[in-house]
Amino acid sequence: MPAFQAVYLRARATVGFLGVDYLDEAGAARRLVAATGVTYPLAADPKGTEVLKLGVTALPTTLFFTADGVLRGRRFGALDADRLRAAIRTYLGQ
């Protein structure tokens, strides 16, 4: 999450970020956000149904959507800041 936060702070004018709290209870999610200092938007999927609709089968998974909602790519596994920036360029041209 810190790598995503760093990239978010530099790219937020041109790229949207949304973190999804998957199968977690609200208190644990809030503690994690407080511990990591994340400021990008977050959503909750406590039952995991929405994540499954997106074809997520492993965590962590990063999905890349165009502004009009078209899924352009996905990366499985953790991404450091350099790999996240490279994936943004690859899938979104930013």
Image (cartoon, rainbow, N blue to C red):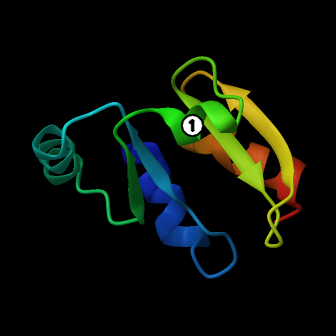
**Residue depicted at 51% across the width and 58% down the height:** 18
Left-right relation of 84 to 74: left
Left-right relation of 18 to 68: left
The kind of residue on which mark 1 rests is Val
In the rendering, at what x and y percent does residue 71 appear? 83, 50
In the rendering, at what x and y percent does residue 49 appear? 52, 35
Front-lying residue, 17 or 43: 43
Asked whether residue 79 appears in the rendered view, the answer is: no
Asked whether residue 64 appears in the rendered view, the answer is: yes
**Residue depicted at 33% across the width and 66% down the height:** 39
- Quarter of the image containing the N terminus? top left
Q: Which residue is mark 1?
A: 51
Front-lying residue, 63 or 88: 63
SS type, badge 1: helix
In the rendering, at what x and y percent does residue 77 appear? 59, 21
- Quarter of the image containing the C terminus? bottom right
**Residue depicted at 27% across the width and 33% down the height:** 24
Residue occupying the far bottom of the picture: 13
